[in-house]
Each structure stands twice: as C-alpha cells, then as structure tokens.
Amino acid sequence: MSDCLEQMRTRARKCADTIHENSEVKVVSHIDADGITSAAIICKALERAGIESSVGFVKQLDENTIFKLADQNPELVIFTDLGSGMLETIIRSGLNVVISDHHRPRGDTENLIKHHLNPHLFGANGSTDISGSGTTYLLANELGDNHDLAGLAIVGAIGDMQNRRNGHLISLNREILEEGVSKGILSFEKDVMLFGKQTRPIFKLLQFASDPYLPGLTGDEDACIEFLHRIGLRFGDDDRWRRWIDLEQKEKQTIVSALLQHGLSSGQESCKLERLIGEVYILLNEREGTEMRDATEYSTLLNATGRYDNAEIGMAVCMGDREEAYEKASRLLTEHRSNLVDGLKFVKTNGITKLSNLQYFDAGSNIKETIIGIVAGMSTSVIADRNYPIVAFADAEGGVKVSARGTQDLVRKGLNLSEALAFVSAEVGGAGGGHDIAAGATIPQNSKDEFIRRLDSIIGAQISKQ
C-alpha cells in the first residue's frame, strides 16, 4: 500500500495547492461520525492555514443540494466524505470543487474532476483501507503539519466500521494509526468491544450491548445486575458500580469468560461471540473517563449528534469544545442508545421477511430514518440470517429511506450493495450508493414492492456469478 499512499499524497498536494489559491472555502460533509470528523479535520487545517471556512452537513448529496450550492456562488467547495458519487452533476453545476471522499466513484472520474482525492482511484478499498476522515487527513497534511489530527481520522474510521472485517485497522488506516502512535496521540490494545468502557457502570455496558447482542441481558437492566452479582463482581468503595476502566485485569477476564459461557448456553454462535474482544483505540490527549478517550465511544457520540440533526454539535466537540457542546452531545447519545435498543426490539417483535436472495423489514415511522441503517446492521448480529443481506425501509421526508447491510462472507461471494442499490433505485426514480458491504438509497413511497423485487433479482445475479 506504500505506492497507493504516495499516489494519494501526490494528488492531495495538488488539491492543497488549489485550496491555497482561495481565501474562503465552503465545506460540505456527511452527517455521520466519518463525515463530522472529516469536516473537523479540514476546517482545523484551513484555520491553521489562514483560510476562512464555513461548513454545512447533508444526509445525502443530491442534485438539488448541489445546484442550491451553485446558486450561492462560493469561491471553492470542499466535499468531504461525499461527492464521488455525483461527479457529473457537480460538473454540470459549474462549482469549483475539491473532493475528499472514499466511496466508490461514479462516472468518468479521471477526466471529470482533477482535484478528486479518493482511494479507489489508486487501487485501495474505501470500505476497509481508509475512511473519508483518513482521506481528508492526508489532504490536511498537505495544507500544513496537521499530524495531531490523526486521532480524529481514526475516530472516523472506527465510526465507519473499517475495523470490522479484520477485527483491527489495516492498510492506509494502519499507517495513520502508526503516525498517531509515534506522535504520542494514539495507543491501541486488545479489550472487550462493549460500548461505554470509559463512562458507564458495568451493568450498563451489558444492558446496551448490541454487537454482539447478549440474549437475556441486552435491554434488561435487572438481568444485567443479577448476572454481575452471580459472578461475584464487587461494588466500588462508595457502594456504586465501577466502570470497565476501574476493574483489575482478573475481574475483566472473569466477566468476559462468564459472558462467553452465557452466550453459548443461550445458543449464540461462537463466531458472533468472538466479536466481544477486539483491538481498541485510545486517544491519549483526551481525559480518561470521557467518551472522547475511546475511539468507539467518540464515534458513537458523533453519530448521535449527526443522526439527530445536530452534526454541528459533534463538529464543535471535535474542534475542542468540552463544555456546552459536549454536554449537548452526551444527552443526544443517551437518547441514541435507547432508540437503538428500541429499534432492535421492534425488529424482533415484527420479524423479517425473507426472499430468495435477501431479507428485509419495513419500520415505517417506528424507527428514525437516520438510524435505520444501524438497526439493520445490529439485526444481522441478533435476529437476521447472516447468509442473506438485510434491507430496511423507513419513512423519510419526500420518500422512503433504504439501508442495506451485508457480511464479509457475502462480499467475497460477489455481493456489491453499492452497485445494486444505485442501479435499482435509479430504475424506480430514486438515488443510492455506498460501499459493497453497506449502502443506502432514497426511493419514492409507492415503489417499495418493485424495488425489493428487482433488488432481490440483482443480488441473486451478483452472487451466482461466483
């Protein structure tokens, strides 16, 4: 990957040269953790370079958004964590742009936009090798010395689940991680993958566990407390539950061993339980006991802000606000985790419909469209059949939000959800795209039946080719 990295840095240098020619920049980014960290990285780099910037966040970049931007006649627009799927529309709009993205490009990429930084153009995979924030981190370091932003790049990568396939970060992400380690900004270690190690009482880790789902424990506070009592975990000195970071190593091992036994006795597959342990990433300059100390918790905090229409609050946290913005983000996070558990319960209660090559559920207005993809992904660990990709529908403004999730095994068999959703959504008058393993679309309200039928056929063709 060293050749790819050098090629990306060369392209990033050309993009940076273009940015330096402008005195004012409009940044447009996605609302998830990867998009928010991408925006924070480039805005911090622009600030240090003495270039004024403003930022806007969008759920999806569509033709309407692009032409509204063009009407504002900005000097330069930098798209981060999006843009590569709308190259031809961007050209038609006449916007002067730099694109820093990691999603698979659509269109004649080399001849359309010269200032286009994307790993796919250089032989890397934007689903596993580098995220939008990592790509933007490479761009930021051509604007000046911004290596201290490596932590945000890793937070974005974890938020984009780039560590899932291998259980740890690889390739270009690994290079960024090692840069952060060498600068004393990051560290990594093997640990339990449950959310809330820095901040939550231990029973809350179990109560809100979603990947892996813990049968009989997830969503049931009393059962989690009873489980910990049963294995003899003691309270802290002040008769309060301790956090994971307060435990001794032997106590951690006791809990993990008991959780594995509990999962197996509940009929859970060992491959799902293996996800209990993985590589975790620590931001050393952040205060211990806060969400920002752990990359997974940090990314979830940011996702909570973006998915509840407050991405600018997440951005403020990334830019250093540890008071008002952090307090607001923490409240949104509490709501977010509760909604995810409720979403899982909805799917479990209402069930999943299986077709020949996929499975799906329709949440209607019961699950917020900005978190339907997360619930779909969690369902593959809990309820759904991992031998089929899962597709989820949720009501959205002006149509239906579609989120699809696959597994690495299915991708190896030929599944490419990005291509499938882009093709079928266009057929029914919508738009979509994403990654091979995870993709999304927006389609007209009355097209769900035709969409799912056509998607089932396309996915069948993809997998049968192998």
Image (cartoon, helix red, strand yellow):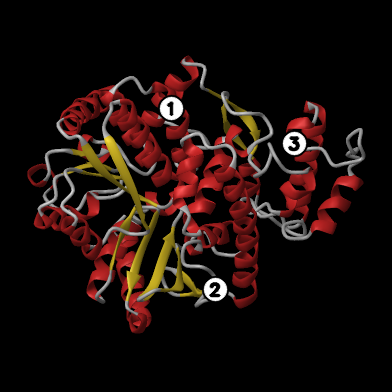
Q: Residue at x 12, y 39 (%)?
A: 114
Say what secondary structure mark 3 lies in: helix
Q: Separation of disc 2 and disc 1 at Cα? A: 40 Å
Lateral position of residue 292 relative to residue 82, left or right: right
- Foreground of the two, 118 or 258: 118
Pick the front one: 265 or 288:
288
Q: Nearer the viewer, residue 211 or 64?
A: 64
Query: Residue 444 vs residue 279: left or right?
Result: left
Percent coordinates x, y for residue 121 in the rendering = 20, 39
Residue neighbourhood size for the residue with mark 3, other residues' Cα within 10 Å, grouped as few (<14), some (14–19), many (≥20): many
Amino acid residing under circle 1: Ala
Inspect the image, locate mark 2, and give the three-letter code of the amino acid beneath it: Ile
Inspect the image, locate mark 3, and give the three-letter code of the amino acid beneath it: Trp
In the rendered image, which quarter is residue 375 located in?
bottom right
Q: Residue at x 31, y 75 (%)?
A: 454
Query: Residue at the location (81% across, 28% down)?
Result: 250
Q: Can residue 19 be seen in this snapshot?
A: yes
Q: Which mark is residue 244?
A: 3
Q: Tag on residue 352?
A: 2
How many numbered dots are placed on residues in this image?
A: 3
Query: Which type of secondary structure does the marked residue at label 1 adopt?
Result: helix
How many C-alpha atoms fall within 10 Å of the one at disc 2: few (<14), some, or many (≥20)? some
Residue underneath mark 1: 150
Residue 341 in the image: above or below residue 322: below
In the rendered view, does 321 fall on the left or right side of 443? right
Judged from this view, the residue extending furthest toward the bottom is 446
- At 67% across and 43% down in the image, what residue appears? 196
Q: Decide: few, some or many residues near mark 1? Use Cα within 10 Å; few <14, some 14-19, many ≥20.
A: many
Q: Secondary structure at mark 2?
A: loop
